[in-house]
Amino acid sequence: MMQHGAYSMVLYISEGKQPELTNLLQQIVDNDVETNGIVPFKQIKSIHFARFIALGKSIDVHGQEVASRLVLTTNYDMPLENHIQEMVRVAGPGLWRIFSLCQNFSSGNYNADMLERFLLSQNIPSETFYVGVGYRSVQQIHNENLLRKAINEFADGQRALLQNEPAQAARQRIINFVRSRPDLKWADSPEPGPSRAFTISRYAKLIGIIALLIIFSPIILPFVIIWMLIMLVFEITELQAPNPVTKDQIRALVARETQLVQAQFSALGNIKPGSFRLITMKFLLQSTNFLAPYIFTKGKLSGIPTVHFARWLLVEEGRQMLFLSNYDGNSENYLRDFINIAAKQLTLLFCLAQGYPKTWLMVFGGAKDAENFMAWARYRQVITNVWYSANKEVSVMNIFQNSKIRCGLYGEMTETEAQKWISII
Amino acid sequence: MNDQLELNDIQGIIIRGYSNLPAAHFLLLGMQDPAAVKQWLSLMAKDITPGDRDPGESAAHIAFTFDGLKALGLNADALESFSLEFEDGMTGKHKQFFLGDFAESAPERWTWGGPNTADIHILLMLYAKDADVLSRNKNTVLETISRYGLHEVQVLDTTVLYKQKEHFGFHDGISQPTIKGLKRADDKENIIEAGEFILGYKNEYGQYTPRPTVPAQADAANLLTPMPQGSAHDLGRNGTYLVFRQLAQDVPLFWKFMARTTENVNGNNDEKEMIKLASKIVGRWPNGAPLVLSPEDDGGKPESNENHFDYRQSDPEGLKCPFAAHIRRSNPKDSLDTDRATSIAIAKRHRLLRRGRSYGPPLTEKLNPLDCLKGEETNVERGLYFISINADIGRQFEFVQNGWINNPKFKGLYEERDPLVANHQNPQDSSHTGTFCIHHNGLRTRITGIPEFVKVKGGAYFFIPGLRALRYLANVTT
């Protein structure tokens, strides 16, 4: 059973080096993000998704300038040390070249050990990390998609036979076919599930937290009510900052969406001023981070069935927030899903960002104001200079279905169960 | 703001489809002398049929491309206030990818509206009760326009097909949203807020879809009403956007494919299975009966206009109407992967008012499948002028085209685009033909090698102004 991590690093770009850096990143894209000579992502087998963003100068909520920054993020198969070592092994010199254009990075000759230590030291933990395709490695997702294709081709060839015999016999025929294929040897046994210890500790944590909440509820509840009232005063008195997004901004953003199946979203927001709101924000994001694996199962982020991975990061001592996600479809559909399916839940996680449509008690209003929400999201969206996806032809729903198909190869089934399984092939 | 529909200011084509005016011409015009064109617009404005008038024996409507409004000399701020999709049109590189217009459907090959064809500024839509009246009206227009600085780029003729069918032989025009405020009886699910189709009214989000305005000083004569907020004047009110695409239909290819795929072991045609496959692809039988309600045969009626059905309860696994079928993805109703109410609410935010007409001679008179199969193949082009009306091109037409019709991952699918109208020629596609699965209890039947039955031959986005806005455009000063 594979677990996933979210690696994030943010570096200030050296004075005057932004054009050179942007150029270098563009070379990665122009020479095929998978195989280019700078960072050949396809060879880094631990990566699900990765991106580079060259953030231009921005203005924080106090009107102060924040210098331009380079952002590198990956969604990787644990453990982190292996992932970092693999990145250095495959793309060390390329990464060195990129980081050399940033502040606080050695400008000397390439040194793999130093690069590895540097990468490890720069990792910023996510406030919230959402995983839609839980517990599957890059390789497993790839393999299970191949398995489904092979079974489908076999089934097409044997269709008349498979449709006219009992489902159990048809299933056995498919199992025999898989067994006969040396390249599908890995599918002879199921992917190991979570260990007993893992499952116990997973639920123990949840039960522990709930128990604590119940025990301390007489203290917590009045506290929460007062907290909410203070927040309400903020909400009533503050004005929504404008989101003067231009057509050219949107054109530049959507022009980079050129993949058939998946797309990415990167946004940089300002957190509204004051420690009260920063603490609230942190609390909400971290609670979501804790609860996400329990409540967002089956690949749905608050009911949105298309998100592979998403993360919320606080940067600049909590003055700014980065939101990064990888999903199926295009950004227009994706943002519409926010509004249509998960307005309240996502409003809770974004309401303390500057310019977000006006909210009441942090869940009401907000994304329900569709026009304003779209303007805010587009205004805060930034160009992702380099974006890589390892399994670019599968949707979240495909990944889940592929696993279901594989699981059907093992154990006993009744005729009805076998029929149901065959119908999802 | 008053949400009562101002029918006398809305062009009639938005309100009704003119089934009583079967003859129609669509004139694509270019302008060379804007000053003269404005005089013509003033004259023409009187002949444009408003939504509150029974058109009698003929009707006329007018719409503009972004280039057309620019050529007229509309204020730069006003031009900027139009939607991004309208301004950019449907032929840019990203748009080609987004709409799936590749290979034979590529804009470079279009006969109008493409990068290699003459600029189009104005669309004039003429409707009449018969060919004589239509031809008279058309001739009058064509005689007049040359005197007013306009030229004809193309005249698109339409055809009336047997019993409201389209060229493949399917009863068409069945699923139409009902505009709220018109007091027409319909299922609640099918009554859509006016703001989805007409600017200046509330949409399905309870908001006003962004609409074009002009700065107050550019409307000194106060021809337009002021916006409820700010000082600008309302150019969009009672107008909307119109999507026009010329879709060629390859009827022999369509029926030959159905016949070849369903022929029996002896290589003989199986008419029943052939029609059934075509119906699975469409989601309705040729007579219009929806598969969800009559999965095994067409129910025997000569024609059906049935829209009162659901997917969630009646066909959750797509055993009757496949998930990939044309009607199930162009209006998924309650079948999206959310709870029922949310699915219906989402579907209502992506509806299109359809005003299309067929063109080209029918392959056979009555368009029966077997006749079509045996029909003489010629090089004549035939198809559909796909015309749809929506207040937000991005959220409605483009969303449906990209997210539902051309999306191989729609509803958990893997590689199935719309088998009837989608394009399979994206260079990133591993296969350049379509795939379509018919589900049963047990193993599905997977059909591969589906070619494009429909190809795009031309198209453009238009703004169809309210009548006040039209008079403003006729008087716009540069």
Image (cartoon, rainbow, N blue to C red):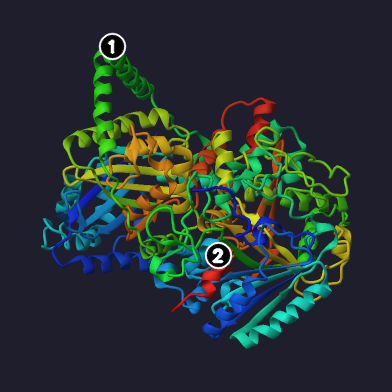
Q: What amino acid is labelled 2 in the image?
A: Arg
Depth check, front residue: B417 or B108: B108
Q: In which quarter of the image is the N terminus of chain A?
A: top left
Report the residue marked by disc 2: B468
Q: Quadrant of the C terminus of chain A?
A: top right
Q: Callout 1: residue from which chain?
A: A
C-alpha separation, residue under disc 2 versus residue under disc 1? 67 Å
- Horizontally, residue A111 falls left or right of residue A220, namely left
Report the residue marked by disc 1: A215
Mark 1: give few (<14), some (14-19) or many (20+) Cα within 10 Å. Answer: few
Q: What amino acid is labelled 1 in the image?
A: Ile
Residue A383, image x and y in percent?
33, 59
Residue B210, image x and y in percent?
46, 56
Q: Is residue B251 above or below residue A7?
A: below
Q: Quadrant of residue A160?
A: top right
Residue B253, image x and y in percent?
76, 65
Callout 2: helix, strand or loop?
helix
Residue B320, image x and y in percent?
73, 40
- Horizontally, residue A414 falls left or right of residue A93, namely right
Depth check, front residue: A376 or A169: A376
Q: Is residue B402 visible?
A: yes
Q: Is residue A409 visible?
A: no
Q: What residue is shown at x 58% (from left), y 51% (from top)?
A: B404
